[in-house]
Amino acid sequence: MFSYFLRRLILVLPVAFGVSVICFLLVQIAPGDPLTAIMPVDATAEEQAAMRAAYGLDRPLPVQYAIWVGNLAQGDMGRSIATGRPVAGEVFGAVQNSLLLAVSAAVIAFPIGIFLGFLAGYFRDTALDKAVTAVSIAGVSVPNYWLGIVLVIIFSVNLGWLPSMGAGPGGSRDWSWNWEHMRHLVLPAVTLAVVPIGIVARTVRALSGDILSMDFVQALYAKGMSRFDVLIHVGRNAAATALSVMGLQLGYLLGGSILIETVFNWPGSGFLLSNAIFQRDLPLLQGTILVLALFFVAMNLIVDVAQAAIDPRIKRS
Amino acid sequence: MALTETLEPVQTPEARKGYWAGVAQRLARDPVSMLCLAVVAALILAAIFAPYLGLADPYKGSMIARLKPIGTPGHLLGTDEQGRDMLARLIHGGRLTLFIGLMPVVFAFFIGSALGVVAGYVGGRLNTIIMRVVDVFFAFPSVLLAIAISGALGAGIVNSLVSLTIVFVPPITRVAEAVTSGVRSLDYIDAARATGASALTVIRVHVIGNVLSPIFVYATSLTSVCMILAAGLSFLGIGVRPPEPEWGLMLNTLRSAIYVNPWLSALPGVMIFVTSLCLNLLSDGVRSAMNVRD
């Protein structure tokens, strides 16, 4: 098991390297001089050159990259141009809030998705199956930023039950598990859960349908096993694949929540990202994307290893 | 006599008309796919011919006629926050939304297929280089990658097209490479090579025809995501710039109106939802018509 983990880890390293290169290049493809934001308009050519040298921008790109990665390794992601605060602190604070939102959405989405998918797979080609399939196609087709607005219209504007934005009285820094705060979480988490519900339901439907039609299920019934015990066997066979899909979905929830965070003004990484974009705060943009992408890479690694732990067939292949 | 009658169904029209005609025929028998095809076609035609449909000017606002409700005489679907006719803006909005929502998949289909087929056919070091680069792009959730590139490049139609194309090239390349590697190991490819055919000829004559349909089916399944992402970029303000009518951008600017005229502000999203739903169902229809299993 441990050697499998090491093998996967070695495969992840070049990917992590590539991710850092892409994040580094993001700043390079941005139009305009990164210095224009901080230089006074009347700066002379000598002053500009001095500033360029001070920031290391006169060095060749590979050298700049090496310095950047060296700083990263020491936890230094540079300073935000807009606020002057270290990027690392800003990003980790925001990622915590995003993680809260993503995990809440996952807690809503995964059980519902598994339940619906299993019902559809078990009662294949019935009206129930068709209904679940319709729900899951609608779930993956809906632009969730629009769904968020619709939910705000229904539950905030018309009914007045839930707040439409923010993360509660204390703002971004002060979260606690009481209703005063949690009511702010309901709408964004539900909105974010809709797409994974569709995807998980679709996956579990296909999986459970395929497994139920396998011979061993007939054999289990034939030897007199109860319906419930057979379902446990089916569940164990489906677990590895279902788990990997859900792990990836959790990664997508974290990386893809930016639109939902914008709709609900949720103080997470997406909110930080859109601020960074509009203030042309490139170090902050770079840092946020790097952290989210590396989280996604780590999530993939965890999923791979967990999958192999559940299903020994994967390790051998 | 009886014998010929029983034999007749064997000569199905599909067998005579060729593969694609058969796919079209099977697709035509599926009512859901045909309905979705009709909706998508109607939206595309309405977008293309929008200037000739006798609609109001989508750019002409009115200070006094702002946020008129749905059903106002003269403004069938009401007016937006600047008093512009919603019906005109929704139909004109399809021009940019559908263009930016569909073209990246078309571009990515060609680029990704080319990269994937070359990687899969040539193999070796070239394959390793192409596929490792593709792996790196898979480390980014697609929403994040699109926003990152668009955010760095800045708003604009061309920038949106570029960033969305970059998002969809890696997944298509991966599928194309997998399918091509599968075909590459078949005997008839070896036979073709043994006759002295060049790599280009083998790819053109023997490989392309066998790998294109699975890649095509996969690409159609990406159109709905691409639509949602394209409108999402404009919704965030890093896609199409105002005052152009575009569904995502309209959804964004109308957010300020949700306390005044809530359902009006949800209309552009309905357009995005209907389009992406139809694209998804149509893609499922094409998939089963082509007998591709995933």
Image (tube, coloured by chain):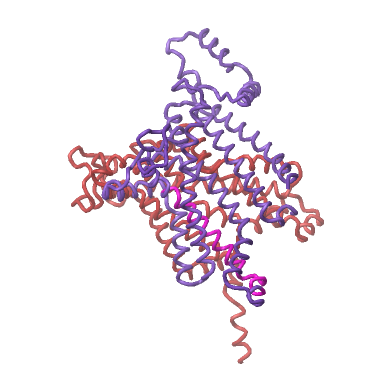
Chain colours: A purple, B red
Is A216 in the magenta?
Answer: yes
Q: Quadrant of residue B205?
A: bottom right
Q: Quadrant of residue B84?
A: top left
Is B211 in the magenta?
Answer: no
Q: Residue at x 52, y 48 (%)?
A: B105
Q: Is residue A263 left or right of residue B110?
A: left
Of A274 and A87, the residue lying toward us:
A87
x then y, percent, for residue A71:
61, 23
Of A226 and B189, the residue lying toward us:
A226
**Does B201 sit above or below residue B17?**
above
**Does B202 sit above or below residue A286?**
below
Query: What secondary structure is the stretch in magenta mostly built from?
Result: helix
x then y, percent, for residue B187:
78, 61
Q: Quadrant of residue A212?
A: bottom right
Q: Is residue B46 left or right of residue B174?
A: left
Of A21 and B27, the residue lying toward us:
A21
Give the mark count: 0
Q: Residue at x 46, y 45 (%)?
A: B229
x then y, percent, for residue B244:
35, 39
Q: Residue at x 65, y 48 (%)?
A: A304
Q: Which residues are magenta?
A: A191-219
Kindly give the residue lying farthest to the right in the view shown. Answer: B194
**Does A44 sit above or below residue A278?**
above
Q: Residue at x 61, y 40 (%)?
A: A298
x then y, percent, for residue A251:
54, 44
Q: Is residue A5 left or right of residue B47?
A: right
- Location of the C terminus of chain A by quadrant is bottom right
**Does A47 sit above or below residue B190?**
above
